[in-house]
């Protein structure tokens, strides 16, 4: 029988994909609304707040390293923000622009240096970083 953690890890990519797709669709709905700029700003604030809460609830890293805490925050929040803004941008433009938005968004999700960004932010802005 598989250990519990191994069985949960099998579903993690699927759950992550569903959440990112839902946030992408929320971005599309925000882009189609009459007050699309307000919806964009509200969505960004809401996603950032959700990322902070999810990072705090998840416990974050075991040590008190500010860079590790920021990396955990970036790892949760930035993919959601990228998906939301990509969905918002998908509403306007032709098929080429839509393809480019999806391609650039997927590239950012995969290639963004979360650990390096967390370390750089902690070094630049936090004491003891």
Image (spheres, rainbow, N blue to C red):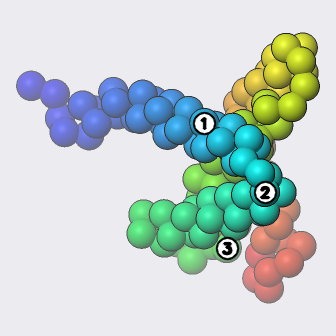
Q: Quadrant of residue 14?
A: top left
Residue 62 lies, with reference to residue 107, above or below; the image says below
The residue singled out by tag 2 in the image is 35
Element on which disc 2 rests: loop
Q: Residue at x 51, y 70 (%)?
A: 53
25 to the left or right of 99: left
- 33 and 106: which one is in front? 33
- In this rendering, the count of numbered labels is 3
Q: Could you tell which of marks 3 and 2 lies nearer the N-terminus?
A: 2
Q: Residue at x 47, y 33 (%)?
A: 18
Mark number, residue 25: 1
Q: Residue at x 85, y 14 (%)?
A: 95
Mark number, residue 66: 3
Q: Quadrant of residue 35?
A: bottom right
Mark number, residue 36: none
- 68 and 83: which one is in front? 83
Q: Check disc 1: other Cα within 10 Å, few if <14, some if 14-19, many if 20+.
A: some
Residue 51 lies, with reference to residue 19, above or below; the image says below
Residues at marks 1 and 3 touching, judged by CB atoms closer than 8 Å:
no
Residue 49 drawn at (x, y percent): 60, 69
- 35 and 86: which one is in front? 35
Q: Quadrant of residue 46?
A: bottom right
Question: In the displayed image of the protein, which residue is found farthest to the top?
Answer: 96
23 to the left or right of 43: left
Residue 55 lies, with reference to residue 104, above or below; the image says below
Can residue 68 be seen here? The reply is: no
């Amino acid at each position: 029988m598989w250990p519990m953690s191994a069985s949960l890890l099998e579903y993690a990519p699927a759950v992550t994909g569903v959440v990112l797709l839902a946030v992408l669709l929320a971005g599309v709905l925000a882009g189609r609304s009459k007050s699309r700029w307000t919806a964009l700003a509200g969505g960004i604030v809401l996603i950032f707040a959700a990322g902070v809460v999810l990072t705090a609830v998840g416990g974050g890293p075991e040590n008190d390293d500010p860079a590790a805490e920021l990396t955990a925050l970036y790892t949760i929040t930035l993919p959601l923000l990228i998906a939301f803004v990509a969905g918002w941008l998908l509403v306007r433009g032709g098929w080429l622009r839509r393809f480019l938005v999806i391609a650039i968004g997927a590239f950012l999700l995969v290639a963004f240096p979360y650990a390096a960004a967390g370390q750089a932010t902690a070094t630049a802005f936090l004491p003891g970083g």
